[in-house]
Amino acid sequence: NAGVTQTPKFRVLKTGQSMTLLCAQDMNHEYMYWYRQDPGMGLRLIHYSVGEGTTAKGEVPDGYNVSRLKKQNFLLGLESAAPSQTSVYFCASRTGANYGYTFGSGTRLTVV
Amino acid sequence: DQQVKQNSPSLSVQEGRISILNCDYTNSMFDYFLWYKKYPAEGPTFLISISSIKDKNEDGRFTVFLNKSAKHLSLHIVPSQPGDSAVYFCAANDNYGQNFVFGPGTRLSVLP
């Protein structure tokens, strides 16, 4: 049982390049989330999805897009990477309103 | 303005002693709270939760206390062990919201 899997684990991008981060969960969870973690800021919500085919903006959505075409996958896209998007990105999923998240192990992204 | 605050960025405790991690929140609608533990290069893992209908929840060495009138919760770890050294995040949910709001985290170091 893999839980939540994020790919890639590390990536270095040049300013202006684009990339997609993939999150896959095998727990049949309805809710999926993308967070970024920056020093002193905790985990800030980028986008989330409450079910297949739905997405919504979180606290810091600018510069990112997401898609949830299949229930088990949640993709995070950066169309034109900026140095301010250097961060550690975590995907999470959960099954209901009052249940805790299961997190992936993170993607460390550096934009130079 | 942060809705969930962890005002101590770091805490050091001797092995065997009690660790107390604090969390304050501003939104009176929050009624479900989680604590997560995070080791370096790993995703956060769920530790313990508490609902607003309780003022205490225990799980082994971990106890969470909730003071609704003060909008304050605390995590007690007794006895502290070196393996408890990690960053601890407090998170809150208003039960109607679809997301948890995370605090900035407290780095706990348990010294042998």
Image (cartoon, grey):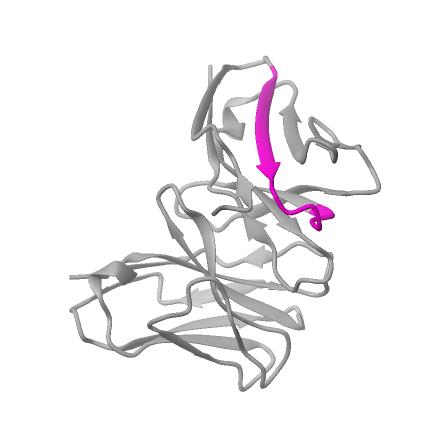
Vertical comparison of A92 with B67: above or below: below
Vertical comparison of B88 with A41: above or below: above
The picture quadrant where one finds residue A76 is bottom left
* Residue occupying image coordinates x 16% and y 69%: A15
The image shows residue A17 at horizontal and vertical percentages of 20, 76
Looking at the image, residue B29 sits to the left or right of residue B17; the answer is right
Looking at the image, residue A61 sits to the left or right of residue A29; the answer is left
* Residue occupying image coordinates x 66% and y 70%: A29
Between A88 and B84, which is closer to the camera in this rendering?
A: A88
* Residue occupying image coordinates x 67% and y 62%: B97
Vertical comparison of B44 with B96: above or below: above
The image shows residue B51 at horizontal and vertical percentages of 78, 44
Q: Is B19 inside the magenta-drawn segment?
A: yes
Between A9 and A95, which is closer to the camera in this rendering?
A: A95
Extreme residue toward the right, this view? B53
The image shows residue A31 at horizontal and vertical percentages of 63, 70
Label tally? 0
Q: Is A83 inside the magenta-drawn segment?
A: no
Looking at the image, residue A26 sits to the left or right of residue A59; the answer is right
The image shows residue B91 at horizontal and vertical percentages of 60, 46
Q: Which residues are magenta?
A: B18-32
Between A47 and A27, which is closer to the camera in this rendering?
A: A47
* Residue occupying image coordinates x 62% and y 56%: A101
Vertical comparison of B91 with A98: above or below: above
The picture quadrant where one finds residue A89 is bottom left
The picture quadrant where one finds residue B94 is bottom right
